[in-house]
Image (tube, grey):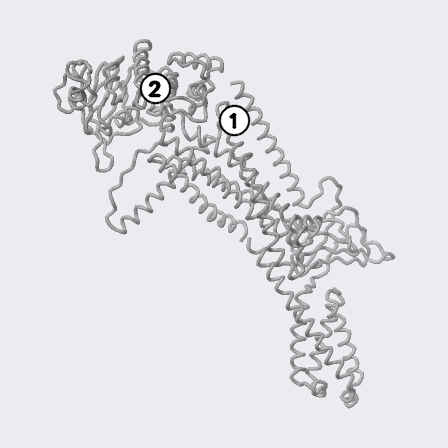
Amino acid sequence: MITQEPEFLPPALNLRGRLGRVVLLNCRNAGRALLILWEALLSLRFIFSKRSRGTVLHQLYVTGIKSLGVISVVAMFTGMILALQTGLELRKFGQEVNIGAAVMISMLREMGPFMTALILAASVGSAMAAELGTMTVSEEIAALEVMSIPPVRFLVMPRLAAMMVMTPILTFYACMLGVVGGAVVGLTQLGVSMPAYIDNATRWAANKDLYTGLFKAFVFGIMVTTISCYQGFATSEGAVGVGRATRRSVIISYLAILVVGYIITRLFYE
Amino acid sequence: MRRNRLRELSLEVTVGTFMFVALLSLCVFTIILSRENVFRKAYPFEVIFDDVIGLRDGDNVVIRGMTIGKVKAMVLQDDGVRVVSALRRPVRLKKDYKIEVVISSVLGGRYLQISEGAAGAEDLPAGEIVRGQPPNDIMALVSGVAADLKDITGKINAGQGTLGKLVNDEALYNDARAVVGELKMAIKDRGLINNLETSLANLNEITDKINRGEGTLGLLISDESLYLEAKQLIGDIRATVDDMRETSPIVTFSSIFFGAF
Amino acid sequence: MIRLERVTKYFGEHKVLDAVSFAVERGETFVIVGFSGAGKSVTLKHIIRLLTPDLGKVYVGDALISAARGADLARLRDRFGVLFQGAALLQWLNVFDNVALPLREKTTLSDAEIEKRVAEKLSQVNLEGVYDAMPAELSGGMRKRVGLARALVMNPEIILYDEPTSGLDPVTSRAIDQLIDRMKVELNVTSVVVTHDLFSALAIGTRIAMIYDGRILEISRPGDFIRSQNEIVKQFLEAQYITQRGVWERANHATQ
């Protein structure tokens, strides 16, 4: 059951009790979040069914198309900053043509998935937490449960599907725009010609860079959805609770993106 | 409800178009990054190396400075590494062919260089195994030589003004000879660092003079110009060595940068 | 039809329900009244198993809903229609889609059949021609009626109403009361209504239960309820200007 009974814990007696409770509660919350994820993954089989198609489509639109604007700006400037910073350093050695590789590789491996995931966590993820949180406090989730419409299938699955599809695509888009931004800076500030830049960029980057980046984005998408939806469902106490759920979803998503990003990098680049 | 249907349709079109375009460009980009040209016929070319000193899949294959293909795959074998490359045109090797892995920049890019051999030479019989040159790592060579040179110049500096000591000291002289020999080899093979080469030519000249004047040390010592020449030359070499040390931060920087991921 | 046996519920240290027992018969409209925070809504949530009792049992028919799980629970819940306090309509769906939601999610009816059923239910709650309106554009009374239509759309045997008239003006409240009464007469459904609105309780209830501090104080027919000798029930009645004669009038001290 997604609707949880209200929780009342007696005050902890001492430091050890409080510490133990924090650990236990966090483990329990993580477990609940993972169970939601598991159920959502299982309900992915309904993704093309007639009743889900509309919602999935809507979520794809909200996640993908609506985020394009902010991602474009952020990706462009990330690429430009990368090009400018590394370019100025490399110029000291007369190696500014290598900004192509620097921008391309950092975008593909790290900045692309990272930036995209952070933006999605802050925009789409927080919206998920707020939406589901509001639904929880206004008893809409309870209403769904009473109607025997599984909230996870009805609400989480479309969002999960949209994030699983859109995060890698948006990441790719962000990488491309970042590389373009780098090229603009290269051309105007560092005197690196477009063909030289492109040649340098494509010579050093490998498909491994591209696909580990996209894999990372895929994982980030799943994580942000799980965390945000769990926080939404765990909302209590009205508007204040919705605010808290939103804030928590963003903070936890950011931390998870950083930590898991490091772990994945470590896995693929020993 | 009619309005809904219409909105859903335009939504479908938007989302579908976006995903289609994204996936298509992803495919194109994948092909670009795999450095393959799927639309052109490729000629396979195999060569076996003892050591490929860091050649990578996708590196260029070059004949007389012209890129004619890419390295496709490398397989470790008992007798070395088999490098398979795809060329845009067939290559006809002569008996005196030479194939080597060349370092293209201090940053460490590599390419595969093919020299087919002299135009008049005999064709290589079909089916014969093509072998690459053993490695000749210029960076290691140059830095080794540089260290030696520094050593010698240090010694010379210590014996300042007494060139006689330099000449008299048999061991030091032999050192210098050995270093010059090494440097000569390195420079001849690569022609990479021009002013080092000219310095070396000069040094060579002096050592030749020393050689010729063997047994007549008085002549050498009294020859003021030769002394000055030698001194000037040693300065040049030190400058070159310093230059080389200065460029090393690039290597360090890039290895840190690309190692960071 | 619905039976609670000594249902006890703690929220932390606080005992919200203390051995609450009652039975609701088929076709009855059972009204639970009480002060705010007395445990009315909590009782209702136990019936539909949004809460699980710490002690005691809840039966729906012969089935023990307080221990049901998974598909059994879903089957039991399918016998209910619930009108939540805020109507709990999905904000991003229009009126038609909200009412059609259970049909679309749980049945294989064709679009035409769904449209027919939704139109029928919306006309039952006196709402026609507002299919395209979004919940946010509706007034409170309309929202409740849409919520009721959604509760009715699967033709449930039992309807639970959580504060159906709270936040509504008196005229709209009476209209809702009439709707509840009509459901009973026309569809012969069993209803459980939680409210603190005594007018509505007296108008629609076949029996009224008063909950105070987690305990049932009194269960009786409306005529007996207003003549109750229980001090707290009397206080509750008087607070809404209802005297023992059953006529409502301005309290004397207010006019004197």
For numbered disc 1, what is the local secondary structure? loop
Image position, residue A83 (x, y; %): 61, 52
**Front position among marks 1 and 2:** 2
Q: Nearer the viewer, residue B211 or C27?
A: C27
Q: Please identify the residue farthest to the left as the structure is shown.
A: C229
CA distance for labels 1 and 2: 29 Å
Query: How many C-alpha atoms fall within 10 Å of the one at disc 2: few (<14), some, or many (≥20)?
Result: many
Image position, residue C254 (x, y; %): 18, 22
Image position, residue A99 (x, y; %): 64, 53
In the picture, measured across the screen, residue A174 lies left or right of residue B82, that is: left
Residue A255 position (above or below residue B248):
above
Q: Please identify the residue farthest to the top as the structure is shown.
A: C186
Observer able to see residue B225: yes
Circle 2 is placed at which residue position?
Answer: C81
Q: Are marks 1 and 2 in contact (CB under 8 Å)?
A: no
Residue A49 position (above or below residue A234):
above
Residue B203 position (above or below residue C243):
below
Quarter-of-image position of residue C215 = top left
Kind of residue at disc 2: Gly
In the picture, measured across the screen, residue C226 lies left or right of residue A179, that is: left
The numbered mark 2 sits on a residue in which chain? C
Kind of residue at disc 1: Phe
Instruction: Say yes or no: labels 1 and 2 on the same chain.
Output: no
Circle 1 is placed at which residue position?
Answer: A48
For numbered disc 2, what is the local secondary structure? strand
Image position, residue B216 (x, y; %): 79, 89
Observer able to see residue B74: no
Q: Nearer the viewer, residue A23 or A196?
A: A196
